[in-house]
Amino acid sequence: MKEETYSYKTPSAQLVKIAEIASQYKGRPEMLMKVIIRSQKIVTAFSASVAAVIAREMDIPQTQVYSFITFYAMLSVKPRGKYIIRMCKSAPCHVRGAKEIVDALEDLLQIKVGETTEDKRFTLEYCPCLGICEQSPAIMINDKTYVNLTPESVRDIVKRYIREEVEE
């Protein structure tokens, strides 16, 4: 396990909440996805201490938890922003203008793909496919999908998030 890749500190209050969730599934490794999904509502990233708590409370190896977390693109061992913007990098999105959308996002947020804004509000990431190719280019911001984007429309969407004019 690469300890240095997720060596930041998770607040103890969050670890207690995660322990409460994971302890409900002790000895049930098949429930790891459920524990991870519920835990992700508490933490924006899975630190070594989060993985250790889940492993201890579920009675499974920490390497199993870490392997699980690093396998899925929607999970992260790096701290991310309140709003995670995922840009589809599939061929249909690319052909239909994804590069212009990414350029508009990077310009507006002053970050590159893979980075988080200084205020920890936005993280910009690529994802393999959102499954809505017929409406590309598309992005997801947390759990909301936005389709048929233009550079102007994506700027307007993100500005609503900047102003906190969106429902979570």
Image: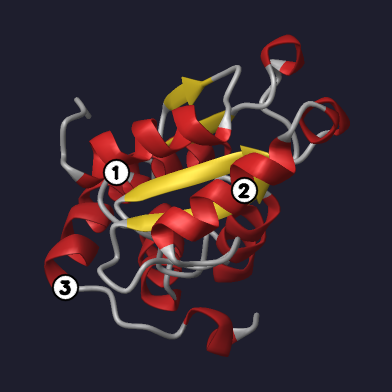
The residue at the point 16 percent across, 31 percent down is: 165
> Residue 64, how many percent across, how many down?
63, 60
- Residue at which label 2 appears: 102
Q: Three-letter amino acid code at disc 3? A: Ser
Q: Which residue does the numbered mark 3 point to in the structure image?
A: 12
| Quarter of the image where one finds residue 149 | top right
Q: Please report the residue visible at 73 percent of the width from the left and 31 percent of the height from the top.
A: 129
Q: Is residue 79 left or right of residue 125?
A: left
Q: Which residue is denoted by mark 1 in the rendering?
A: 41
Residue farthest along the left direction in this orientation? 13
Which of labels 3 and 1 is toward the front? 1
Q: Which mark is residue 98?
A: none
| Residue 52 pos. (x, y %) | 42, 71
Query: Does dot 3 land on a helix, a strand or a loop?
Result: helix
Q: Amino acid at mark 2?
A: Val
**In which quadrant is the C terminus drawn?**
top left
